[in-house]
Structures are given as structure tokens and as C-alpha cells.
Image (tube, rainbow, N blue to C red):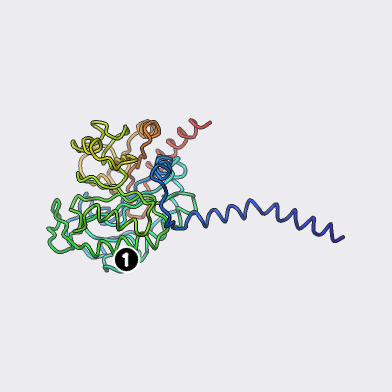
Amino acid sequence: MIQQVLFKMLISIIAMLPLLTSCSLSRSSNEISKTPLPDSVRAKEIQDMRFGMFICWSFSTFSGKEWTGEEHGPDFFKATGCNTDQWAKTAKEAGMNYILFLTKHHDGFCLWDTQTTDLKSINAPIKLDVLSKLRQSCDKYGIKLALYFSEGDWNWPGAERGGWMKGGANPEMKKAQLKELLTNYGPIEFIWFDAAVGDGGLSHQETVEWVHQFQPNTFCGFNALEPAGRLSLRERGAPGPIGGDGLTWVEDAGENEKQYKGYHVAEFTYPILPKREGGADWFYSLPVHDNLCIPAQKIFDDYQGAVTFGNIFSLNIGPNYEGNIREIDVKTLQEVGRMIAATKE
């Protein structure tokens, strides 16, 4: 009798092992590792992500233009919802493996509950730490997380609001904001640093060293001509080898890739919106453009290029006023997902 009871208990434990293993992996995958991996190993992990969704959602969603240079309070972020589950689910259906999320654009509005400023989404009508909600959705759907961060800020000393390369300098605040992002939101695969309005008073090499204090395996990429980090960024770019020519609209970028020896992976990105008149490109444009989208075949072709050259491809999407991805984007990405799935059959 005792043997029968023990046998049944053993069978029950064996049956639960897959669930226990899954839970254990889920917990460990969301832990921040302080142990640096060899560059070759970490680069392979980044390359294997292949395809992701670049989410831009901030003041420019509501201004209808790319750069929102006027001074605004948090109430200007008028979002009535925040459907991060839809974002992550759509990414999964598209065959994507990560979401690259805009945490702060040049206007300084923070999409997380920062302690460095009151200009943040928790003080907007939505009253929400958007990054925290997105982290939960990413974990739910098995999607990794990367971050966009504007290095400069038009609210900082010396800034020229709305001006090119005039984001002011505040290195201690830049460090404090990065520390929050790297310690409060789980593992970050890479950071897409935008230096369009300057480096914020902290050089790119110093920025890399600061990031690696908290997450040594986070790749850093800089959208600037000053090379640094392990990830080469190609804004409005295309798939191709590191050091290739004509792979982005920035003429000198290919030369930098050839000369700088620190790059291990190249990332390229462009908006899902085709060329048109008016509205933003990287953010939600205008309701009149709600039926415009680049073809699924174009996206799939560039996905295949990313696989061929070991790049990662961040396709830009702009959620709308309600915090939803546009219906046409969802349908297009689902079609891309079916194309990708067919290559694996």
C-alpha cells in the first residue's frame, strides 16, 4: 500500500517537472546578470533576436510632427489607453523577438516613473508607468526588451529648445535616469542612444562604462558619427555587412563601421509608414494616414536580409492616441509573421 502511494507521488512529481522547469526558466530569464559574457557569445545572442518592433509613443504622437520643440507639461500626453499586451502580442504574431521602446525623446518626457523629473507619464492623464506595463506584457508573450534613450534634453542647461544638437548638458541626471532604467525594469538587451541633440554632457565612452556597471551584457549603440559601443545603428538603414557602403542615409556611417573595431552587430531601422505629405514618421502620424503602410513583402525581404548578414531589424511602429497599434499595421505584421513561419516549415 505504501509503495503504491509513493509510486503515485513520484508520477505526480514527474508530471509537474515541465511546469516547474518552465517557471524556473521564466524567473531566471528576467534576472539581471552582473556576469559579463564573452563578446562573441553575447553578439550571437543579439544576432539571434533578428527582428523586433521599435515603439515610438510620446509627445510627438499628439503634436503630429517629429520633434515637439515647444515646452509642454505632462498633460500634453493625452493618451486614453495603453495596450501593451496588443503591442507584445502583435510582435509575437509577426515573428519578432524583441521590442525596442522609446523611454525619452528630446523633449524630456519620460515614459517611466523616474524620480529625476515630474515630466513623466505617471503625471499625465493616463497616470501610468508605461515601461513597467510593457515589461509585464513582454514577459507574458516571451518578448525581450530594448530601450531608446535621447542623450540630450531640451530642458537641460544650455539647451536650445527644438534645436539640432542643442539638448543641453546634465550628465548627473543622464546617469541617474539610465541607472533607473537599468536597475528597475529587468534585463535590457541593448540601448539605442540618440545623440541628435547632443550627448547630454557625458561622452559616449563614459556612457558605455556607466551602463555596464549595472548590466554588462547590454549592448550600446549610438546614433551619431562618434563611434562607440558594440552595436552599430543604421537609422533609415538596410541589411548588409558591417563596413558595407550605402546602408543608411548617413553618408559617413559606413566609413565609421570600417574604421571602428568595436562593433559586433549592426542594427537597422525604418518606419512602417511610407513617404507622404505631413505628419510624423516615427510616431503616430495623423488620422488621415491611417490606411498607409509599407508592403509586407518589403518588410519580409529586409527580415531575410537581416538573417543573411547577422543584423537585427527594428521595424518602427507608432501607437495611436488610444495606445493601440493601427489596424493596418497589425494586419501587415501578421502577414509578415506568416511569411516568416513558412520559411521554418
User: What residue is at 38 percent from the left and 48 percent from the top?
Assistant: 325
Instruction: Give the vertical position of 176 relative to 304 (above or below).
Output: below
Q: Is residue 164 visible?
A: yes
Dividing the picture into quadrants, the one containing residue 334 is top left
Q: Quadrant of residue 304?
A: top left
Mark 1 secondary-structure assignment? loop
The N terminus appears in which quarter of the rendering?
Answer: bottom right
Q: Residue furthest right?
A: 1
Task: Name the residue that disc number 1 marks.
Answer: 114
Residue 317 x %, y %: 34, 45
Identity of the residue drawn at 39% across and 57% down: 82
Above or below for 338 versus 164: above
Circle 1: residue type: Thr
In the rendering, at what x and y percent does residue 245 appear?
24, 31
Can you say whether 294 is above or below 178 in the image? above
**Which of the pair 102/274 is nearer the observer?**
102
Neighbourhood count class around disc 1 (C-alpha, 10 Å): few under 14, some 14–19, many 20 upward: some
- The spot of residue 201 in percent (x, y) is 18, 59
The residue at the point 32 percent across, 51 percent down is: 191
Instruction: Answer above or below: position of 281 versus 140.
Output: above
Q: Position of residue 126 (x, y in %)?
A: 35, 64
